[in-house]
Image (cartoon, rainbow, N blue to C red):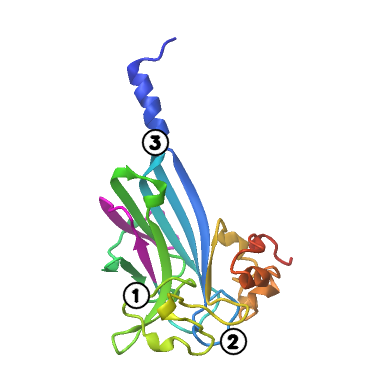
Amino acid sequence: MTLTKRQTKTEQAQVEQDKSTLHGVYAFEDMWPEPGDYDMNDVMVYLEHEKTFSSSNVKKQVFSLTTYQNYVSLKSGLAMKLVTKATPSSVVMKKKTPGATAATTANFTKDGDYYYLTEDITGELGTTYIFEVTYSSAVSLSNAATVQPFLYRKEDNGKQWEVHIPGEAPTSKMNTSYYGQGDDCSKPSANKYFVRKGDYPFAFYMDNARIDYFTDNILKRANESKPIDTFFPEFIGWSKSNGKNNQDWYLHPIR
C-alpha cells in the first residue's frame, strides 16, 4: 500500500520530536576554602537533561536538578547559571517537592543569567528544580543551553560566599577575599577559579553518572567525614590527572 501524504507528514513529525536524556552528578564541599573536608557529600545535585529535537537540531531542553546531601552543619543555598548562546523564546521554571506527583510553577529569583533556587538546601532537600528552555527556531547542538549549578551563602556586606566547579567563574557578588585562603589556589587574573592544592577538589561534575552510584557509600550517614577515595580508590588518580585518567572511577567502588 502506498503511503498517503498525511501519513508521510505524521511519520516525519514523529522523527522530528525525537528525545534524548543525559545524566550527571555535581558534588560540592561547603567549607571552601578551608581544608579538612574531603567527603564530597555536603551537597550533591543530580542533573537530568532532556533534549527534544527537530530534525537534528534542538527545539526544547529540560534541565532537572535534584538535591542530595549527607549530614551538614552549614546553611548553603543552591543557584544556577543558565548559559545560552541562542536566545530562548521562553524559560519556564518549575519545582517538584519530595513526594509530589507533579511539578508546580516556580518563580526563582533571577539576576542576569543567574537563578537562585533556594537559600537553604537542607530545608528543601530532595526538591527538584526544573527549567524548560524552548526555542522559536531549533538551534544546533553547539548552540544549545548549558547549566552551571553552584553553592552560595549571603553575607552582611552585600557580597556572598560561593563555590563553583573548578574553572567556572563566580558571580559579580562573590566575596573575592576568600581567594588564596586555606587550600584555595585560585588566580582570577588567569581565569583560574576554585582550584585546590592537594588531591581533592572543592567540587566536581561527573557526566553520565547517576546519583544511585553514591547512595550506598558517601551519602550514607555513617560515612560522613570519610574521604571519598575510601569508597572510590580510583578517584585520586582521576583528580590528580584533571580528569584525564580513571574517567569511570565512580563505577568501581569498594564493596
Using the image as rendered, state which of residue 44 and residue 179 is in the foreground: 179
Quickly name the residue at label 1. 171
Please name the residue shown 32% across and 80% down the image.
Answer: 173
Point out the tag, 3 or 2, that comes first from the N-terminus: 2
Using the image as rendered, state which of residue 86 and residue 51 is in the foreground: 86
Q: Is residue 227 above or below residue 56?
A: below
Quickly name the residue at label 2. 36
Label 2 crowd (10 A; few <14 / some 14-19 / many >=20)? few
Q: Nearer the viewer, mark 2 or mark 1?
A: 1
Label 1 crowd (10 A; few <14 / some 14-19 / many >=20)? some
Please name the residue shown 70% across and 62% down the image.
Answer: 252
- Give residue 84's position: percent from left, percent from top: 33, 57
Amino acid, disc 2: Gly
- Give residue 115's position: percent from left, percent from top: 32, 67
Q: Is residue 124 above or below residue 53?
A: below
User: Circle 1 sits in a helix, a strand or a loop, which is it?
Assistant: loop
CB-based contact (under 8 Å), mark 3 and mark 2: no
Q: Which residues are magenta?
A: 79-103
Point out the tag, 1 or 3, that comes first from the N-terminus: 3
Amino acid, disc 3: Ser
128 sits to left or right of 212: left
Residue 83 is drawn in which quadrant?
Answer: bottom left
160 sits to left or right of 18: left
Quickly name the residue at label 3. 55
Point out the tag, 2 or 1, that comes first from the N-terminus: 2
- Give residue 71's position: percent from left, percent from top: 54, 78
Can you name the residue that lies furthest to the right here?
255
Q: Is 91 one of the magenta-colored residues? A: yes
Using the image as rendered, state which of residue 70 and residue 42 is in the foreground: 42
- Give residue 103's position: percent from left, percent from top: 36, 56
